Image (cartoon, rainbow, N blue to C red):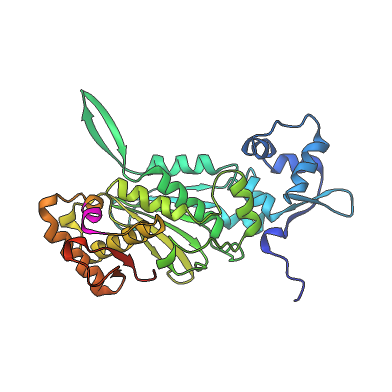
Amino acid sequence: MFDHVPFEQGIAAKKVSSEEVFVRLDYPAYFDLLQLPLPDNRNAILEALNSDGLISRCETGNWNITRLGALLFTKKLDYFPDLKRKAVRVICYKGRSRIETLKEQIDDKGYACGFKGLLGIIMALTPGNETIRQSLRETTLTFPEIAVRELVANALIHQDISVTGAGPMVEIFEDRMEITNPGKPLVDTRRFLDSPPKSRNEALASLMRRFRICEERGSGIDKVVFHIELFQLPAPVFEQPDGFTRAILFSHRSLNQMDKNDRVRACYLHACLKRVMGDYLNNASLRKRLGVDDKNKAAVSRYIREAVKEGIIKPFEETAPRRLMKYLPFWA
């Protein structure tokens, strides 16, 4: 009970030969991600994997493959029965509901060696918008790829990998994308932008940072919100349903199609983003974020009042003239 070993440091396969290590793990990807040349002898490769805790020596002279090594670099998660359900499921539905599935794909490679391929699968299944420019058809992405990348990386890294029977899942609908991982978030979902980074899987997060797949500076959600605003999409939703963490990205909707909750959420996340950048929300910045003309200042003022009434933003200075009013998120 007192000798608690983190799940990622547990053993996924015991007493395997060096040849079996090379069969099960995509070791060239490890050196590629670290931008290092592949050693010219097997012992040097094994020692490098051992130094990062991906494998470990056992008393028989063979090797144990750790769960960390299997999760990050396995060629197939089927090689490790207790990790099989940690494969990422990507499901594309017809329309806006889960009634009819168009395609389902399971990416069973390790999170590090398979991340680029996983992102390719997701973006290929994401519906795009066709536009014609100078007689050429161009397809524009429904969601900014960098936002999808950051949220998928977060789902892999911050999941509770000790939960059995559940793994990360990406669901793609006609009007949104939902990215879900097992485990409650370690911080309040309303504070994702400003909270210091926390990870329940420290070794996994550290290696993913070294592979440049994620950052441990807590700036991933900042990038998501920034690029969502740049694309002028509805603000994302972060929620925690029944022991899971879920992020939802929405496809383009005009301001007239947004309801009060959409507008309030957009105001709040805009205020949060401005705060972490050392700035403030005001009428002009929110007009730019929502793509509203200057002549519609009154409508934007109404949206700000809705957010203030909900208690999620507050005036920086109550007595300032109306045209100079600036706003902060409630926690500032």
Quadrant in which the N terminus is drawn: bottom right
Q: Is residue 31 magenta?
A: no
The magenta-colored residue range is 282-287
Q: How many marks?
A: 0
Q: 290 left or right of 106?
A: left
- Residue 104 visible in image: no
Residue 116, placed above or below residue 153: above
Q: Quick one: which residue is furthest to the right in this view?
A: 60
Q: Residue at x 22, y 72 (%)?
A: 319
Residue 224, placed above or below residue 4: above
Picture quadrant where residue 142 is located: top left
Quadrant in which the C terminus is drawn: bottom left
Residue 200 drawn at (x, y percent): 60, 64
Residue 133 drawn at (x, y percent): 22, 27
Residue 46 drawn at (x, y percent): 79, 41
Q: 39 left or right of 291?
A: right
Q: 27 left or right of 272?
A: right
Picture quadrant where residue 307 is located: bottom left
Of helix, strand and loop, which mostly describes the magenta segment?
Answer: helix
